[in-house]
Amino acid sequence: MSARIVLFDLGHVVVDWQPIRLYRDFFETESEAEAFVRDVCNMDWHLQHDLGVSMAENGDQLIAKFPHFEAQIRAWKTRWLDMFEGYVPGMPPLMAALEERQVPLYGLSNLPDEVAQETFDAFPMIKLLRDVVVSGAEKVAKPDRRIYEITHARMGHPDPADVLFTDDRERNCEAAEAFGFKAHHFQGAEGFKARLVSEGLL
Protein backbone atom coordinates (compact mmCIF):
# COMPACT_ATOMS: atom_id res chain seq x y z
CA MET A 1 0.00 0.00 0.00
CA SER A 2 1.32 3.45 -0.91
CA ALA A 3 1.25 6.39 1.46
CA ARG A 4 -1.30 9.15 0.91
CA ILE A 5 -0.41 11.54 3.79
CA VAL A 6 2.98 13.11 4.51
CA LEU A 7 4.03 13.96 8.06
CA PHE A 8 7.09 16.20 8.47
CA ASP A 9 9.50 16.80 11.27
CA LEU A 10 10.46 20.50 11.13
CA GLY A 11 14.00 21.11 12.39
CA HIS A 12 16.68 19.75 10.02
CA VAL A 13 13.93 18.61 7.62
CA VAL A 14 11.86 21.67 6.67
CA VAL A 15 13.83 24.44 8.39
CA ASP A 16 17.58 24.64 8.99
CA TRP A 17 18.01 25.02 12.77
CA GLN A 18 21.52 25.14 14.26
CA PRO A 19 21.93 26.80 17.69
CA ILE A 20 25.62 27.41 17.09
CA ARG A 21 24.69 30.10 14.55
CA LEU A 22 23.44 32.30 17.39
CA TYR A 23 26.40 31.65 19.65
CA ARG A 24 28.99 32.60 17.08
CA ASP A 25 27.85 36.16 17.89
CA PHE A 26 28.86 35.74 21.54
CA PHE A 27 32.24 34.07 21.26
CA GLU A 28 35.44 34.98 19.46
CA THR A 29 36.23 31.50 18.18
CA GLU A 30 34.28 28.63 16.69
CA SER A 31 35.68 26.27 19.33
CA GLU A 32 34.31 28.46 22.12
CA ALA A 33 30.86 28.51 20.52
CA GLU A 34 30.97 24.75 20.01
CA ALA A 35 31.95 24.20 23.64
CA PHE A 36 29.06 26.35 24.82
CA VAL A 37 26.40 24.44 22.88
CA ARG A 38 28.00 21.16 23.97
CA ASP A 39 28.48 21.91 27.67
CA VAL A 40 26.01 24.66 28.64
CA CYS A 41 23.00 25.20 26.35
CA ASN A 42 23.06 21.65 25.04
CA MET A 43 20.38 19.35 23.65
CA ASP A 44 19.75 17.60 26.98
CA TRP A 45 18.93 21.00 28.50
CA HIS A 46 16.85 22.05 25.50
CA LEU A 47 14.82 18.82 25.62
CA GLN A 48 13.11 20.18 28.73
CA HIS A 49 11.68 23.02 26.61
CA ASP A 50 10.44 20.43 24.12
CA LEU A 51 8.69 18.70 27.02
CA GLY A 52 6.87 21.86 28.06
CA VAL A 53 9.16 23.31 30.74
CA SER A 54 9.15 27.11 30.67
CA MET A 55 12.17 28.53 28.90
CA ALA A 56 12.49 31.15 31.65
CA GLU A 57 12.38 28.55 34.41
CA ASN A 58 14.82 26.26 32.62
CA GLY A 59 17.07 29.23 31.93
CA ASP A 60 17.06 30.27 35.60
CA GLN A 61 18.25 26.81 36.63
CA LEU A 62 21.11 26.91 34.16
CA ILE A 63 22.08 30.47 35.09
CA ALA A 64 22.38 29.33 38.70
CA LYS A 65 25.12 26.95 37.51
CA PHE A 66 26.70 29.31 34.97
CA PRO A 67 25.96 32.89 36.12
CA HIS A 68 28.69 34.33 33.88
CA PHE A 69 26.73 33.06 30.86
CA GLU A 70 23.40 34.70 31.75
CA ALA A 71 23.19 36.77 28.56
CA GLN A 72 23.97 33.77 26.37
CA ILE A 73 21.44 31.54 28.14
CA ARG A 74 18.67 34.15 27.94
CA ALA A 75 19.38 34.57 24.23
CA TRP A 76 18.15 31.01 23.60
CA LYS A 77 14.63 32.43 23.81
CA THR A 78 15.06 36.12 23.04
CA ARG A 79 17.07 35.45 19.88
CA TRP A 80 15.50 32.10 18.97
CA LEU A 81 15.12 32.91 15.28
CA ASP A 82 18.84 33.71 14.98
CA MET A 83 19.44 29.96 15.19
CA PHE A 84 17.77 29.46 11.81
CA GLU A 85 19.10 29.97 8.30
CA GLY A 86 16.12 29.52 6.05
CA TYR A 87 14.74 26.26 4.75
CA VAL A 88 16.54 22.99 4.28
CA PRO A 89 17.74 23.12 0.64
CA GLY A 90 15.30 21.61 -1.81
CA MET A 91 12.42 21.22 0.60
CA PRO A 92 10.14 24.16 -0.34
CA PRO A 93 9.71 22.92 -3.95
CA LEU A 94 8.90 19.42 -2.71
CA MET A 95 6.32 20.73 -0.26
CA ALA A 96 4.80 22.97 -2.91
CA ALA A 97 4.58 20.06 -5.35
CA LEU A 98 2.85 17.89 -2.77
CA GLU A 99 0.42 20.70 -1.95
CA GLU A 100 -0.33 21.16 -5.64
CA ARG A 101 -1.19 17.47 -5.84
CA GLN A 102 -3.49 17.95 -2.82
CA VAL A 103 -1.55 15.52 -0.67
CA PRO A 104 -2.51 16.12 2.99
CA LEU A 105 0.55 17.53 4.80
CA TYR A 106 1.07 17.58 8.56
CA GLY A 107 3.88 18.32 11.00
CA LEU A 108 5.22 16.67 14.16
CA SER A 109 7.98 18.59 15.89
CA ASN A 110 9.92 18.52 19.12
CA LEU A 111 9.59 22.26 19.67
CA PRO A 112 9.01 24.59 22.65
CA ASP A 113 5.41 25.75 22.55
CA GLU A 114 6.28 29.31 23.53
CA VAL A 115 8.33 29.89 20.35
CA ALA A 116 6.23 27.75 18.00
CA GLN A 117 4.09 30.52 16.57
CA GLU A 118 6.99 32.86 15.86
CA THR A 119 8.74 29.97 14.10
CA PHE A 120 5.66 29.29 11.95
CA ASP A 121 5.31 33.00 11.16
CA ALA A 122 8.96 33.24 10.11
CA PHE A 123 8.70 30.32 7.68
CA PRO A 124 5.52 30.51 5.58
CA MET A 125 6.04 27.07 4.02
CA ILE A 126 5.08 25.59 7.40
CA LYS A 127 1.61 27.03 6.82
CA LEU A 128 1.12 24.45 4.05
CA LEU A 129 0.81 21.92 6.86
CA ARG A 130 -2.79 21.35 7.89
CA ASP A 131 -1.76 20.93 11.52
CA VAL A 132 1.50 20.75 13.47
CA VAL A 133 1.75 18.72 16.66
CA VAL A 134 4.16 20.60 18.96
CA SER A 135 5.79 18.56 21.71
CA GLY A 136 5.99 21.49 24.11
CA ALA A 137 2.22 21.96 23.95
CA GLU A 138 1.57 18.24 24.43
CA LYS A 139 4.30 17.84 27.09
CA VAL A 140 5.57 14.70 25.43
CA ALA A 141 8.32 14.43 22.82
CA LYS A 142 9.48 12.05 20.13
CA PRO A 143 10.30 9.19 20.28
CA ASP A 144 7.65 8.59 22.98
CA ARG A 145 4.83 6.55 21.47
CA ARG A 146 2.24 8.89 23.01
CA ILE A 147 3.11 11.74 20.66
CA TYR A 148 2.53 9.49 17.66
CA GLU A 149 -0.85 8.53 19.13
CA ILE A 150 -1.71 12.23 19.54
CA THR A 151 -0.61 12.96 15.98
CA HIS A 152 -2.64 10.07 14.60
CA ALA A 153 -5.73 11.42 16.35
CA ARG A 154 -5.09 14.98 15.13
CA MET A 155 -4.92 13.69 11.56
CA GLY A 156 -8.33 12.10 11.97
CA HIS A 157 -7.30 8.49 12.70
CA PRO A 158 -6.20 7.48 9.17
CA ASP A 159 -4.86 4.00 8.52
CA PRO A 160 -1.32 4.42 9.94
CA ALA A 161 0.10 2.71 6.85
CA ASP A 162 -1.23 5.62 4.78
CA VAL A 163 1.14 8.02 6.59
CA LEU A 164 4.74 8.65 5.48
CA PHE A 165 6.71 10.32 8.28
CA THR A 166 10.14 11.85 7.71
CA ASP A 167 12.59 12.83 10.45
CA ASP A 168 16.35 13.37 10.57
CA ARG A 169 16.68 11.21 13.70
CA GLU A 170 16.63 7.50 13.06
CA ARG A 171 15.21 6.66 16.48
CA ASN A 172 12.18 8.86 15.78
CA CYS A 173 11.65 7.03 12.50
CA GLU A 174 11.91 3.69 14.26
CA ALA A 175 9.30 4.79 16.82
CA ALA A 176 6.99 5.93 14.00
CA GLU A 177 7.34 2.56 12.29
CA ALA A 178 6.62 0.77 15.56
CA PHE A 179 3.40 2.78 15.74
CA GLY A 180 2.48 1.71 12.21
CA PHE A 181 3.47 4.72 10.09
CA LYS A 182 5.81 4.41 7.13
CA ALA A 183 9.02 6.29 7.84
CA HIS A 184 11.87 7.86 5.90
CA HIS A 185 15.13 8.75 7.63
CA PHE A 186 15.74 12.22 6.22
CA GLN A 187 19.25 12.88 4.96
CA GLY A 188 18.47 15.46 2.29
CA ALA A 189 15.78 16.56 -0.13
CA GLU A 190 16.96 14.38 -3.01
CA GLY A 191 16.62 11.15 -1.05
CA PHE A 192 13.23 12.21 0.26
CA LYS A 193 12.07 13.11 -3.24
CA ALA A 194 13.00 9.63 -4.42
CA ARG A 195 10.95 8.13 -1.58
CA LEU A 196 7.96 10.33 -2.45
CA VAL A 197 8.18 9.17 -6.05
CA SER A 198 8.38 5.53 -4.98
CA GLU A 199 5.26 6.02 -2.86
CA GLY A 200 3.41 7.54 -5.81
CA LEU A 201 3.10 10.90 -4.09
CA LEU A 202 5.09 12.76 -6.76
Image (cartoon, rainbow, N blue to C red):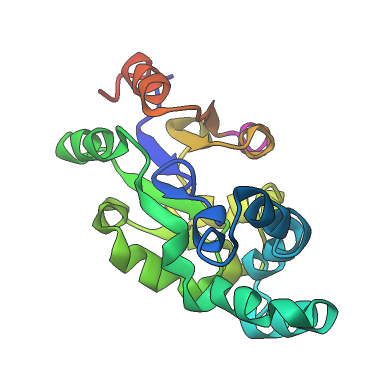
Give residue 98's position: percent from left, percent from top. Answer: 24, 35
Q: Residue at x 37, y 14 (%)?
A: 198
Q: Which of 28 and 9 is in front in this view?
A: 28
Please identify the quadrant where the C terminus is shown. top left
Give residue 75's position: percent from left, percent from top. Answer: 55, 75
Residue 117: in sight, yes or no?
yes
Q: Residue at x 37, y 40 (%)?
A: 88
Q: In this view, does 119 lie to the left or right of 187?
A: left
Q: Nearer the viewer, residue 172 or 130?
A: 172
Give residue 123's position: percent from left, percent from top. Answer: 30, 58
Give residue 190's position: percent from left, percent from top. Answer: 36, 21
The number of callouts visible is 0
Magenta segment, which residues?
A: 176-180
Residue 156: in sight, yes or no?
no
Vertical relation: 192 (above or below) 32 = above
Q: Which residue is drawn at 38% across and 51% down?
A: 85
Vertical relation: 148 (above or below) 92 = below
Q: Is residue 81 left or right of residue 112?
A: left
The main secondary structure of the magenta stretch is: helix
Look at the image and say whether residue 40 sits in the magenta stretch: no
Q: Which of 99 and 160 is in front in this view?
A: 99
